[in-house]
Image (cartoon, helix red, strand yellow):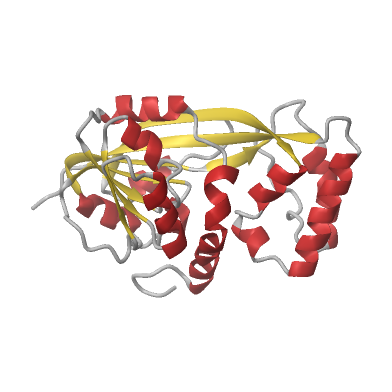
């Protein structure tokens, strides 16, 4: 791994998101309002408090934060995504900075919270907690969550059936890969506490479903790094199979389960 920077592989995959800037805001699911409400309760954030958001993308989480009266500095390294965020957030007191957390040189010790929504795993694990702690005022908070595919009991069988297509193009899941149900996603408790910089305040699970037709589901897949980086012929075959299989359904739709784990931690007092 490159010292002070993400690995070359992580960096290459992270860059793929900028090519999906025009799709991301509409294609990715909205985070539940209850998640933001719980975030404010767990952190004690109030209107006017300053938040540093890591990997803001086009503003999917930034907008709900700003709507709750928070002053957000949104870091986004992708130029196209940063431009979309500025457009989407023009009516809010949000500053969009085209940079990563690793390369950011803003006001240290000035923020009440550092927030990362479906972006923390792209930040260099060797420095992300140190960088977050440096940005925070004493007793500031770190809040991290990601959206992931979950599989409710009795949920849509489409995804299991489609695995044969992924297998055929060499993109199948490894043997024994987990299919977590709502409430079963792993949290970051051990990782956060192992940093020695934060103590956990709250860990909460959220789950919801979204219905997709073929067009909307393929737009979603075009925002996933693995599908963006997929060989064009393989992606064409996969997308064609998705269209063909959904066309056989009476309503032409699938239902995807989404889950998120909100991890909230408070900065520990450090020895001088």
To which quarter of the image does residue 28 belong?
Answer: top right
Q: Residue at x 73, y 69 (%)?
A: 231
Horizontal placement of 256 versus 90: left or right?
right
Residue 87 vs 17, above or below: the answer is: above
Q: Residue at x 56, y 43 (%)?
A: 26
Q: The N terminus lies in which quarter of the figure?
A: bottom left
Question: Visible in this render: residue 109?
Answer: yes
Instruction: Give percent across and percent down for residue 232.
Output: 74, 68
Near-viewer residue (152 or 250): 250
Residue 91 vs 125, above or below: the answer is: above
To which quarter of the image does residue 72 belong?
Answer: top left
Horizontal placement of 90 versus 32: left or right?
left
Q: Which residue is drawn at 67% across and 59% down?
A: 227
Horizontal placement of 244 versus 27: left or right?
right
Instruction: Give percent across and percent down for residue 97.
Output: 31, 58
Residue 267 vs 74, above or below: the answer is: above
Near-viewer residue (222 or 101): 222
Horizontal placement of 73 versus 126: left or right?
left
Near-viewer residue (221 or 186): 221
Instruction: Give percent across and percent down for residue 156.
Output: 78, 32
Instruction: Give percent across and percent down for residue 211.
Output: 70, 32
Question: Visible in this render: residue 182?
Answer: no
To which quarter of the image does residue 43 belong?
Answer: top left
Q: How many labels does the image show?
A: 0
Q: Residue at x 48, y 39 (%)?
A: 187
Pick out the residue farthest to the right: 248
């Amino acid at each position: 791994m490159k010292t002070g920077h993400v690995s070359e592989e992580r960096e290459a995959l992270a860059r793929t998101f900028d090519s999906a800037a025009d799709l991301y805001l509409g294609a990715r699911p909205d985070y539940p309002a209850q998640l933001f409400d719980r975030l404010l309760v767990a952190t004690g954030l109030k209107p006017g408090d300053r938040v540093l958001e890591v990997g803001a993308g086009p503003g999917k989480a930034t907008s709900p934060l700003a709507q709750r009266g928070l002053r957000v500095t949104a870091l986004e390294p992708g130029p196209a995504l940063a431009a979309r965020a500025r457009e989407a957030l023009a009516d809010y007191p949000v500053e969009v900075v085209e940079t990563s957390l690793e390369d950011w040189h803003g006001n240290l010790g000035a923020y009440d919270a550092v927030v990362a929504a479906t972006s923390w795993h792209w930040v260099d694990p060797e420095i992300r907690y140190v960088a977050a702690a440096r940005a925070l005022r004493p007793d500031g908070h770190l809040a991290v969550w990601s959206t992931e595919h979950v599989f409710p009991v009795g949920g849509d069988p489409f995804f299991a059936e489609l695995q044969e297509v992924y297998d055929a193009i060499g993109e199948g899941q490894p043997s024994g890969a987990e299919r977590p149900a709502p409430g079963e996603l792993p949290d970051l408790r051990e990782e956060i506490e192992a940093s020695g910089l934060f103590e956990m305040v709250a860990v909460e699970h959220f789950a919801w479903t979204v219905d997709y037709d073929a067009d909307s589901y393929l737009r979603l897949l075009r925002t996933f790094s693995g599908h963006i980086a997929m060989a064009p012929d393989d992606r064409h075959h996969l997308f064609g199979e998705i269209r063909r299989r959904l066309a056989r359904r009476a309503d032409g739709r699938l239902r995807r389960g989404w889950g998120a784990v909100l991890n909230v931690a408070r900065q520990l007092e450090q020895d001088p």
